[in-house]
Image (spheres, rainbow, N blue to C red):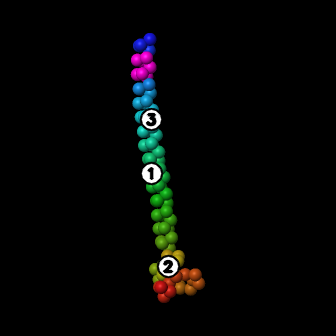
């Protein structure tokens, strides 16, 4: 009877260790996946910003509302003269 109690105690200690290890693995994996998703999202945003600026000509008046150069006739635009 005492051997069964010892065996049960050892089993519970091992099970607790296994669950703790599994919890750590799940936490590390989720942090890795979240970091990877953040990295991919940041790259997508940066490439979108680069795509907008590639075709723009840097002549004209800078429109602070659209963050682009244009001919200065945007009725809702904010230009340097408006500041």
- Does residue 60 show up? no
* Residues in magenta, as a range: 5-11
SS type, badge 3: helix
What is the distance, in whole Å, between disc 1 and disc 2 at their CAs? Answer: 33 Å
Disc 2: which residue: 64
Q: Position of residue 43 (x, y in %)?
A: 46, 59
| Sequence order check, earlier mark of 2 and 3 | 3
| Sequence order check, earlier mark of 1 and 2 | 1
Q: Is residue 7 magenta?
A: yes
In the displayed structure, 56 sits above or below 18; it is below
Picture residue at 51% right of the left edge, 80% below the top: 63
Picture residue at 48% right of the left edge, 67% below the top: 49
**Left or right position of 66 against 4:** right
Disc 3: which residue: 22
Residue found at the very far top of the displayed protein:
1
SS type, badge 2: loop
Q: Does the magenta stretch include residue 34?
A: no
When asked about the image quadrant of residue 74, the answer is bottom right
Mark 1, other Cα within 10 Å: few <14 / some 14–19 / many ≥20: few
What is the distance, in whole Å, between disc 3 and disc 1 at their CAs? Answer: 20 Å
Which dot marks residue 35?
A: 1
């Amino acid at each position: 009877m005492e051997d069964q109690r010892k065996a049960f105690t050892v089993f519970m200690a091992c099970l607790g260790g296994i669950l703790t290890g599994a919890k750590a693995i799940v936490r590390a994996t989720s942090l890795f996946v979240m970091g990877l998703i953040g990295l991919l999202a940041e790259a997508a945003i940066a490439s979108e910003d680069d795509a907008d600026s590639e075709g723009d000509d840097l002549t004209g008046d800078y429109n602070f509302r659209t963050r682009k150069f244009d001919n200065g006739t945007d009725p809702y635009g904010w230009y340097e003269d408006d500041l």
